[in-house]
Image (cartoon, rainbow, N blue to C red):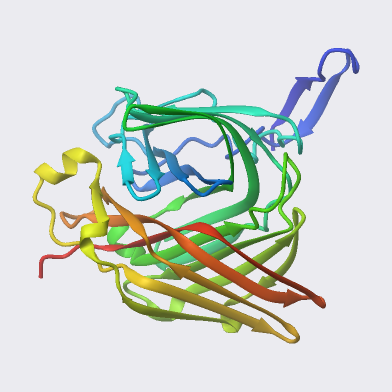
Amino acid sequence: MAIVERPLPIGLSPDPVVALGPEGPFPDEPLGGVIERRWLHYAFVSRDRSLGMVANVSWLGPSPEDPLRRPRCMSIVLVHRAEEGWDASQFSAVTSVPQWSAFRGPEPIGRAGRFEVAAVRPHVGVELDLYRTGRPCTSQTATFAPGHHFRWQSEPGIVARGDWVFRDRMYRNVEAVGYHERVRGRWGWPELGGWVFGFANDPNGTGVEAPETSIVVTLTQPAASPRSAHSSVMIWNRGRLVRHFPRRCVSVAVLGLLDRSRVRQTPALANTLGFPPMAPIPRELVITAKMGPDDVVFHFACDHAARVVVPGETGLHPFSVHEVIGPCRVAGSVSGRRFAFETRGIVEFAGGARAD
């Protein structure tokens, strides 16, 4: 384990701080094979519910043909405006460096950190000050096939303040509440199968205080090993994780299919490649969890979806990640405290795209 020396902020002490381990958000170990990867995920919904945003910054293992063994970096940003749908960059979005992360440092609660991401031609993007208001969940791990796995860690209640660009229009001083996640592991897209990841924050707070209630839902569905499916529902109260419902306590139901006219394929260049049809997206998603006297219902109605086409590294079949925004209702009880709120949430549906 490495020892990292970092000076304290000016005015506290001239002596260095000795911290064990890397500064994060990931271990210092270099990436190995072509399907070893790490990524940072950001998603926000404005308090007035008019805007939504998703950004991914990922690092993949080096190509076998690269003698310098350099990792490959890809980044994309998507912005949604109510009644207008999604707009997106290519996989070449420009980001601030280093990328802000709640898992770096660690980042102190309540202190602003800068995060910027935009398309190369900046028709879409954000320039934000981000604030942590709580703590993350414990790290979780899922396996998909021999030698394929990933580990992720989620933190809702991130407050964002700043400027948004959507289709060349600027929206200034927007305040939003969202979600941040780090993922690392080794997997190929076809082996991954599919997943559902979503979040919602009670929008009624103000400033940089933690939301009264936050929820994160997860479901992984390996293609080759259905019995390895993993799911969980997690509830935060004022920034503190208060209940983690495990797989055996979670039920998932869907109703209908989202009209494909409400789906935009991204990045724009993907439309020129003749990819086969996408996996269907449900019109409504209901996730329920119950453990002893504690329970929660997450009811999400899909409104607009962006189909992000992801090339596969282990075969010719592409993979689809659908960023979906829509109204949701959350209600439940944890440790005798009842909660209920309505807002707009973002759920990520992922699955294969096959012509056969």
**In the image, residue 139 above or below residue 184:** below
Q: Total marks drawn?
A: 0
Query: Would you say 156 lies left or right of 65 here?
Result: right
Please identify the quarter of the rendering in which residue 305 is found: bottom left
The residue that appears at 39% across and 40% down in the rendered structure is 79
Please identify the quarter of the rendering in which residue 318 is found: bottom left
Q: What is the x, y in percent for residue 284?
A: 40, 73
Front residue (pair 11, 21)? 11
**In the image, residue 289 above or below residue 10:** below
Front residue (pair 146, 151)? 151
Q: What is the x, y in percent for residue 291?
A: 69, 83
Q: What is the x, y in percent for residue 297?
A: 59, 76
The residue that appears at 41% across and 41% down in the rendered structure is 32
- Report whether residue 70 is seen: no
The residue that appears at 40% across and 48% down in the rendered structure is 82
Q: Quadrant where the C terminus lies?
A: bottom left
The residue that appears at 50% across and 61% down in the rendered structure is 198
Q: Of all residues shown, which one is farthest toward the bottom? A: 292
Q: Quadrant where the N terminus lies?
A: top right
Query: Would you say 312 lies left or right of 76 here?
Result: left
Q: What is the x, y in percent for residue 294?
A: 73, 80
Please identify the quarter of the rendering in which residue 28 is found: top right
- Report whether residue 14 is seen: yes
Front residue (pair 156, 172)? 172
Query: Would you say 83 lies left or right of 26 here?
Result: left
